[in-house]
Image: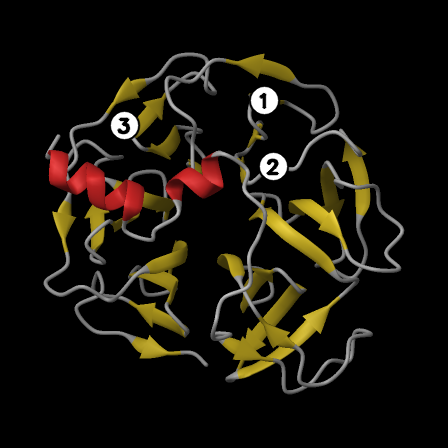
Amino acid sequence: MDPLTRRSLLIGGLGLLGSGALAACAPQAEPPASSSDDDAGGSAGTAITHVHAITRDAGAGTVLLATHEGLFRLQDRELTRVGPVVDLMGFTVAPDGRYLASGHPGTGTDLPEPVGLIESTDRGETWEVLSRGGESDFHALAAGRDRVLGFDGQLWASADGRSWEPHDIPSAPAALAVAPGAGTVLATTEDGVLRSEDDGTTWETLNTPQLMSLVAWADDRTVVGAGVDGRLLTSRDAGRTWTAGAEPVGEITALGAGTTADGEVEVLLVAGTRVLRSTDSGDSTEPLL
């Protein structure tokens, strides 16, 4: 691995160490967005200081931003906050459509500190604690068809979100991603991208062009990663080989991927203060906000 590339990951502002070490969420100097409407109990014009995760709810068709200020829906360039204010340090949409999250409760929110693993079956309007309330703040959280993985300083795996088994992992993961059907797990770490075929029990280090801070599965074969140089990287063979986008899109702090009705790979990302969409590996981007 190129020592310069590794050094840029550690001190270049991508925050792998802070995320892996469960550092407190610090507001950004410039918020990437603010809500123009908030019919879910928050005040209009709520500033978003940090986006922890971005993904699309395929069932609803809306883009979701999991933030320091709670969950927001993004549709037609308008943001609407959903449900109670929870600092969603970890957030994922399970293949069956459930929302799973972790983090810290907002003022007046009837959830433990930290919240542990929480679940929403009404698209974020309400949340229920499934397990580890008052114990775990999963900064890295991912769900597949039959497994949930979370990292709170220890890697945990659960088949039902209620009982957990500890697993070893060679390096602390900044991000976890589970293939929606196959269940292959990827983890971004300071020492490279790790891959597991057995729900996080054993790991191999992938040969990648550069270190990545984030990864997301678009389908069971297609993975998108955020490189330390600001480029998007794409793999069409479940992480074995990668191609990089032609131009950097900036410092990527949140990343999601999926496929469109036309079969294109859709990438959603937050880069700096911009919320973007791309269908060509970042060679061109469309602002969503």
Viewer-proximal residue, 139 or 23?
23
| Mark 3 vs mark 1, CA separation in Å | 20 Å
Where is mark 3, residue-wise? 191
Viewer-proximal residue, 196 or 5?
5
Identify whether 22 is placed above or below 229. Answer: above
Type of residue at label 3?
Answer: Asp
Where is mark 2, residue-wise? 138
Residues at circles 2 and 1 in contact by the CB criterion of under 8 Å: yes
Q: Quadrant of residue 213?
A: top left
Q: Is residue 117 left or right of residue 62?
A: right
**x then y, percent, for residue 70:** 68, 62
Circle 1 SS class? strand
Q: Is residue 227 left or right of residue 120?
A: left
**x then y, percent, for residue 181:** 45, 35
| Mark 2 vs mark 3, CA separation in Å | 20 Å
Circle 2 SS class? loop
Q: Is residue 74 left or right of residue 170?
A: right
Identify whether 84 is placed above or below 127. Answer: below
Residues at circles 3 and 1 in contact by the CB criterion of under 8 Å: no
Q: Is residue 227 left or right of residue 188?
A: left
**x then y, percent, for residue 86:** 73, 56
Residue shown at 53% from the left, 63% from the top: 50
